[in-house]
Image (cartoon, coloured by chain):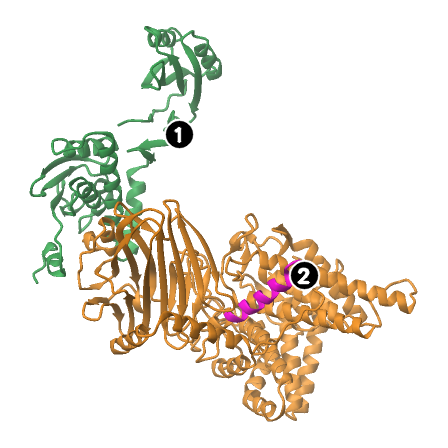
Chain colours: A green, B orange
Amino acid sequence: MVRDLFMFAGLNERTQIVWFKIIYSKEPGSLSSIIDFLEKENAFIMFGHLDNITQKTGEYSVFIELDKNSDPEDFARKVEELDVVSEVEYGVSKYRMIYSADFPLNVVGVRGVAARALTIVDIIKTLNQNVPHAEGLLTMSGLKGGIHSAKYFKSILNLDDSNFADVLAELYRGVGWGILEIECDPKTYQGKIIVKDSFIADVYGGADQPVCAFMSGYFAGYLTEYFGKNISVREVSCKATGKDVCEHIISPAPSGGTGQEYQLRGETR
Amino acid sequence: MIRLPNAVLGNDELLVTMGRKGEILGFFYPRRDHAQHVEESVACIHTGERLLWTNDNDWHCIQNYVEDTNIVSTKLYHDSGIRISILDLVHPDVPVLIRRFKVQSQREISGKFFYYSNFNVGETSKKNSGFCDTDTHLLVQYWQNYYIGIYSLPEFTEWQIGKAMDTIWWTNSKYDMEDGKLQRNKEDIGNINNAAGWDLELEAGGANEFVILMGAASSRHLLYKRIYELSKLPLEYIFEKTREHWVMWLSRKQVLRMPGIEGYDNLRQELFSAYNRALLVLYLLNDHEHGSFVAAPEFDSNFEKCGGYGFCWNRDTSEVVLALKRSGYPEYCDKFFKWCIRTQLPDGSWFQRYWLNGDIAPSWGNFDYSTQIDETGSTLYAMDVYYRVLEGLKKAEFLEEVWVSVLRAAEYLMKRTKSGIHESCMDLWETYYGIFTYTNASIYAGLMGASHLAEENGEIGMARRWKKRAEFIKQATIDRFWLQEGYFAKGVINGKLDKTADASILGTYVPFGMLSPKNPIERDMIQFMIENIQKKLSVPINIHYGIKRYENDSYINGNPWVVTTLWLAKAMFTFALDLPHENAISSPIQETHHEKEDRYDEDVKRFTSEGIKCLKWALAGATSTGLLPEQVDQSTGKPAWVIPLGWSEALMLDNILLLDKICRRKAGNKKEG
């Protein structure tokens, strides 16, 4: 899942965070020789990521904490002088907040961004406070994201009844949206999704009504695309309203007239 | 969401604005300013595999008008080999838009043709109702006494009425088309949308045709009746009737000749087309019941990036009706001035802007300090210009009709110009508070016009008093605002003289005639002013340069404006015509008669040629359909912001008529010689 690297680092006035993208030839022991060199130079490896570009070459992206007085350019040149290394790029995370060796970030096959949960929740709040049909609008927005994700996973792995729920849960955890417990019967399309630590409900503050319509829409889009059948997902319980967790109910979308639509909302008609 | 049109069409009751790919952006019924019933209305094709929206980026498009009509032709090409030809027209007598889609494909398609609409009937997404009448095959959406309906030939075979923005997303018609079939929900309420569907079975190289009628009415019964009656008529007959309507309307125009302009490549034909297009556009901006005009079809009703344009400004409309009068359509003056009599405020002034029915519009000019006095000056000036061309009984009747209004307006201007320049108010660009050259010039012209009308009405005392004040204003404006650099200052802002070069100072010459080329000193002033505006406000883009409004203009990136560029052209053409023949621009050298003749010819040629460059620049900045925008993007050279702007179109008419006059005069001289 992780196609890009990014990190947060605390303040340390004596060091600097530098990333290196090292292209090396994949011969036996070549990666060890790079790591040995870094150790010898007292470069503290914070995070590393390996990627196989071709059968013969590999890419090693590594975040290193260097002494503040070290010259990253000089360091990069020394790495490049290693026999196994063909190319080195580097960059400095000046404020040590967040950095990526690859730009732009890539999430589920397309460009992604990292943002504070509150940044997104502020948008949701502004919509809720100012726009008619905000809940519907957020549902529709989430729906598109969910459809895209399911399409993407179908294209890169064998998505089936045994793993569709796990993949969705792993995605949510990976991007920091929440911890999911999914129960969904692929035969009846019935079930529920418990979201622990939903990033929306967590930072939204108190609310009278559930606030995770965007997530309901996302789940609906994912499941609809996977099952090939319209799936309704509605949030019946939300952490923002004082509950421990958020709960979303899964059911097949009714077809036909408005009567069923209203029943879905719990109204009697 | 702001979306600018590329074409407009309609009839007396209906105004439709359309994007480059044939998507409907605005559907105004029964007035040009209210109500706008459409949020989205566009065709889609389901290829059997995926849904293609005809307004997305994958389509290449060509859009133009059927010559000399308000009938629009749009051609769309998709990389997959699908081609769609759309013909759009509005029946001249009935508020129904008729859309013929011809779908062709290079490869076999077994899919669907969908027509999707998100109506906000009554200009609201709230409390709408929608239904599909499967007996008559009509999709209808209504709110109060506004009914919008869709009918088709052949009749649609599937449909959906769904929630446009709701948590029950699967009823949404937009989404419903994705799987290639519609759910056939028959009715719903609230914020709703709809879709109609037909089978699309195409062999490679084959074609299918779908005709969609989109009508408006004040009741369900009337809607049904209108659509039913129209559906019985062959499309070819309606097309011919519509074409004939526009051709007949254009046949009343002042005929152009433009002798001797052949040297400018295709310019003659381009100007003839632009002339017709301007007339056809202005027809669509006019409220035929009330006589008012929208400045442009509204495109920013939420005032997201500006204050909106779908209202009537007296300043713009005075220019528009006078241009139409000069072009052979005097009745627009008559109706507009009747509207002015009705809308004049109790203090004798006119408000910043109005709804077309005469109600005051949303405004930031509610006080004496924030009103725009030039609008009162412009209106009075225009009334007098119109009066001067009337003859006989009509002349007397008009004066009788407007006299009280003239009296009240002139006294308002007197009240606000006691010191010889006007009291602080807002400028014509609606940006600054202060005292402005342009506004003073408009008041001068208003009072001179009122003085003439008073004289004609036998009120000699009033005539003398108003004329005296007008002359006082002229002198005070020249004394206080004329700069040694050779142009008028913009005005006084925050108590200080603002020397910013502003194209609106051209108003001292055209249209308001405060400076006269008959006076040698004033003639020099006009010439200096023209040169300085060229020098200080030119923005090179496209084939020549455009003129921006003023130095450091920041509104919508400070682009050059079509209005100011055509205003400069108008000043140049007028100057070329006004130059005294026997006395070409003053030369310190003693000249013979022949030398003077040569100089005169040279001057006329120079101003004419510069004016033509401005005209060509404006034409280069028009849409593919020939609509003139307010601005031209200074980096891309493409039409920018308001489309079409009535003021731009009116100035185009004026310029073409002036150039025609220059050409005729020149041809006449040659003949005489």
Numbered circle sitting on residue A103: 1
Between A109 and B538, the residue placed more toward the observer is A109
> Is residue A132 left or right of A25 when viewed as pictured?
left
Q: Quadrant of the N terminus of chain B?
A: bottom left
Q: Nearer the viewer, mark 2 or mark 1?
A: 2
Any part of residue A30 in sight: yes
Between A189 and B228, the residue placed more toward the observer is B228
Question: What percent of the width, then of the height, locates residue B111?
Answer: 26, 51
Any part of residue B492 in sight: no
Question: What percent of the width, then of the height, locates residue B532?
Answer: 71, 57
Question: Label 2, on which residue?
Answer: B612
Q: Chain of mark 2?
A: B
Between B4 and A213, the residue placed more toward the observer is B4
Q: Residue at x 30, y 55 (%)?
A: A130
Residue type, label 1: Phe
Q: Chain of mark 1?
A: A
- Of helix, strand and loop, which one carries label 2? helix
* Magenta part of the chain: B265-280
How dense is the environment of label 1, judged by Cα within 10 Å: few (below 14), some, or many (20 and up)? few
Question: What percent of the width, then of the height, locates residue B616?
Answer: 63, 58
Residue B407 among those drawn in magenta: no
Question: What percent of the width, then of the height, locates residue B417?
Answer: 63, 75
